[in-house]
Image: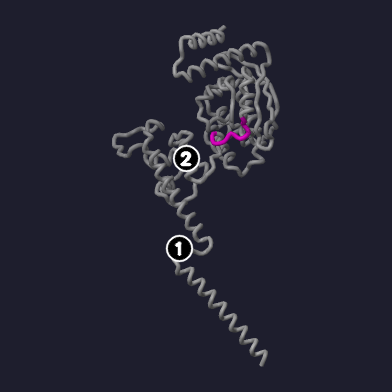
Amino acid sequence: MAQEARAREAQRIRETRETRGNGEVQAKREVPGVREAGEGRESRGAGGSEIRRHELAAFLRSRRERITPEQVGLPRGARRRTPGLRREEVAHLSAVGVTWYTWLEQSRDIQVSVQVLDALARTLLLDPSERAHLFQLAAATDPTPASSCTGVTDAVREVLDQLDPLPACVQNSRYDILAYNRTYARLLCDLDAIPPEDRNCMILVHTHPQWRESVVHLDETMRLMAAKLRASMAGHLTEPAWKMLVKRLQAESPEFRENWERYEVVATRSKTKQFRNPHVGLLDLTHTDLWLSPELGARLVTYAPADEVTRERLERLYAFAQVSSAEAEESGGTAETAEATEAVERGVRR
């Protein structure tokens, strides 16, 4: 009897617990605003993603409509009704499918790689602020050096300035130019005129006419740089920024494609280099790397004169760079700065 009583009591307790549990669940379902754990976060995440897609689509449309065909080298045509570029034109210039780009402007839920975002930013001629906005809307990280200058502190920038008239810059192992002084800005081309996302030695030596003309031993330099890049890339094989750089170089430079297929690897080493500067003439320089952050590949690249002639020419190049910088800041030089520029040019011809 005692055992039967205990069994009945246990059964009654189980039934009571089940009833209470069901009641609590039912109450949660019936009371407005009450959700299961995680339900609200999931809903808000989905809503935020949808809002981002709509904002991204609107931003792309607005940028596309403000670009004229002439700005990107396309004929306008007689029967154009679309303001700015057509969708198929943006897709073609960005090397993506027309249907895919159309889906992007229709807020479809599709994945966008950083390589595609970079191509769209270039096609739509986005400035740095617009480019940053594009990547933010796509919830992606911009891999270009314009978005981040890791390792370049105020102290490092002060060192760069103090090194003038010796050309110096900060690069990473991907050859992105993260910072530079005035002399370096005029060493191989007008670096200030280059968009920040294109300030990469690999890109410039393979695609920029003035940079290429300034390098005396161009073929040897390109082959050596490709070998150094391959050696450095071994630790970054899956990183989008590295893959994007190699893909762009392969698309834009036959010389890089040939050198890349050699599978040569070379460690970084100091050496004497020759540059043909359009303002002061031939320069013989000793190239030295001073590592700032080995784990990130950041290094201070310096060029010391190999002879007294080069030293004197670097001083004149620095004077020219100062004049050019002053003229740019004042939006039109004075008679004094014009005379200084002429003096530098006379020194080149001397």
Q: Residues within 10 Å of mark 1 (few under 14, many from 20)?
A: few
Q: Main secondary structure of the magenta part?
A: loop
Image position, residue 340 (x, y; %):
52, 10
Q: Which mark is residue 133?
A: 2
Q: Residue furthest bottom?
A: 1
Q: Is residue 220 left or right of residue 249?
A: right
In this rendering, is residue 48 above or below 114? below
In the rendered structure, the answer to whether residue 34 lies left or right of residue 290 reads left
In front of the other: 134 or 76: 134
Residue at 64%, 90% in the rendered image: 4
> Percent x, y for residue 7?
64, 86
Against 14, residue 333 (above or below) is above
Label of residue 105 in the image: none
SS at circle 1: loop
Q: Is residue 149 magenta?
A: yes
Provide residue 153's location: percent of width, then percent of height: 62, 31
* Label total for image: 2
| Residue at which label 1 appears | 33
| Viewer-proximal residue among 293 and 153 | 153
Q: How is the image coloured?
A: one colour
Q: Amino acid at mark 1?
A: Gly
Which stretch appears magenta? 146-153
Q: How dense is the environment of label 2, judged by Cα within 10 Å: few (below 14), some, or many (20 and up)?
A: some
Residue 250 appears in view: no
